[in-house]
Amino acid sequence: MTEIQIYFNNIWLAVYTAMVGMRLTFLHLFTPAVTIQYPDVKLKLPERARNRLYVNIDDCIGCDQCSMACPVNCITIDTIKGTPDQDLGTTSTGNKKRLHVPVFDIDIAKCCYCGLCVYPCPTECIVMTDVYEFSEFDRKNLIYNYSSMTQAEVVTAKDKLRKYDEEQAAKKAAAAAAPKPAAPLVAPPKPESPPPA
Amino acid sequence: MEEVGKTILKLIPLVGDQLSEYAVLVFLIGAAPPLIFILLYALVTLYTEMKVSAHIQDRVAYMYTGYHGILQPVADILKLIQKEDTVPDSADKFLFRLAPYLVFIGTYAGFAVIPFSSAYMGSNIDLGAFYLIAASSIVVIGLLMSGWASNNKWSLLGAMRAAAQLVSYEIPTALAVLVAVMITGSLNLNEVSKFQDGGIQNWVVLGGPLPILQKILLIPFTLVTFFILFLAGMAEVNRTPFDLAEAESELVQGFNTEYSGMKFAIFYLAEYANMFLVSAVAVSLFLGGWSSPFGSFMSGPVWGVFWFIMKGMFFVFVQIWMRWTLPRLRVDQLMYTSWKVMTPFLFVCIFAVGLILVL
């Protein structure tokens, strides 16, 4: 092309391509918007979406496996041993509960939603839910306390354990003091026996 | 009202004695409608721009403030009023404060000669179109002033670009206006609109009310001229694809980088007012101004206002539409477009139109 042809061709292309673009945007003006107006309309989450953790404390046996699996140490568990005379019940999966769980705290602000705590749980009591709206004004509110034990219950449980331990220690001492042949005759305490007054 | 006039007279010590109270009153009543129009129009356009840009990108824009976010412009204005109005420490404070008002004055002064209807026109001067081109040059001073006074390299770069751009594009604008003036034989925009009255076939873009042979010969040239006038007008408003003066991706906000609060709002208002001004000029010169497209049907002073604003708003919409379609031009492309494309084309148009009119 000669230079003058290039000149006119460029002008033609500039006008024509601008028109093509404007036609496209004009068509988009009337296509329905793809916006999802979030607080009003919510997208359905995938079935295995990992969001806020939930602990069904009734099923927790206090095994501490979730806490150990957590890569960011956001789960804090404290347990009190149940004395043999107490029946702590069973979980919905049939496991026998042997420990009180006075502290089961999850610092959800630290949680990285990896889901590693969910897999080791023998009773499937720690699960990831589809709740993702839990912002707080105070970071302290993001530490969730799942334990259902009241302060009084904790004190009672601790007292019981201490008494039981003392008893056991006393029995042991007595057994050690007793003559050797008598030792095998001492029966171990039965869990079904009534609590000592 | 008479007392208001007197009070205002006292504020103008030099000229005040020579004017009567009524002159000031007439002046106020004459000057107020465009200002009221600009303020209301800015609200509407703010909303339109956001909605159009959103829908072009398949979004929805404001949805919460009122029905489909209709009150959002009001909320925006309230926000701007409350905002802190900062002046940079090392800025030239007097010029910095003066610049936004100068930009707005330059635009507002242009509205004086815009015929909103056959009955209303701010100032019925015979050199209307000429005055308009002169008055809109004040904007350049304001932009350059704001950029220089900000003492900021982005602002200065933006202001320099704005000045270069506006000065270059005034030439195609003036030449395009000249084409319309040659056909209509008047610089008074009201006379120009009157010339085109009587239906769509009399509009200058379609050859005006001339003998049929002349009309047909004129149409290609008037169409090209109208197209160029509109594009040159867009360049004078500093909007994408000609927004080099603001160029967010390169210069933050260009000349108004340092502005905040109400001063920024006034820049914004001036930009929107300017959008309507260039549309209004294109409409009154080429598309019949306030005249109805259906001849005597729906014509008259009141319908005139309706038609004028409708036509103006349509081209404001086209500007918004173009803004959200086309990318920004490079500086050299901008200058190329003005000096090597628009100006030669307009010279050809002027020559051809002159020849045809002599026929």
Image (tube, coloured by chain):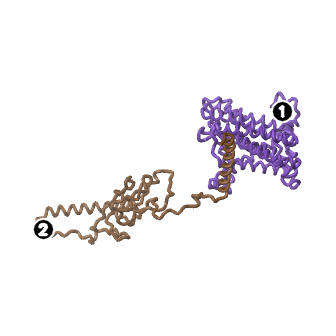
Chain colours: A brown, B purple
Give how far across and how far down residue B197 sits, in percent.
87, 49
Residue type of the residue flagged with mark 1: Leu
- Left or right of B63? Residue A144 is left
Residue that label 2 marks: A182
Give how far across and how far down residue B87 sits, in percent.
63, 33
Residue at image x 15%, y 70%? Answer: A185
Residue type of the residue flagged with mark 2: Ala
- Whole-angstrom CA distance, mark 2 to mark 1, is 123 Å
Foreground pick, B213 / A147: B213
Q: What element carries label 2?
A: helix
Residue B9 circle label: 1
Q: In which quarter of the image is the C terminus of chain A?
A: bottom left
Label 2 in the same subunit as label 1: no
Q: Quadrant of the N terminus of chain A?
A: top right
Q: Does the image show residue A130? A: yes
Residue A156 circle label: none
* Chain of the residue on which disc 1 is drawn: B
Which residue sits furthest top?
A: B14
**Mark 2 against mark 1, which lies toward the viewer?**
1
Q: Does the image show residue B105? A: no
Foreground pick, B250 / B214: B214
- Left or right of A97? Residue A132 is right
Label 2, residues with CA under 10 Å away: few <14, some 14-19, many ≥20: few
Quarter location, residue A171: bottom left
Residue B127 lies, with reference to residue B289, above or below; the image says above
Give how far across and how far down residue B279 sits, in percent.
76, 45
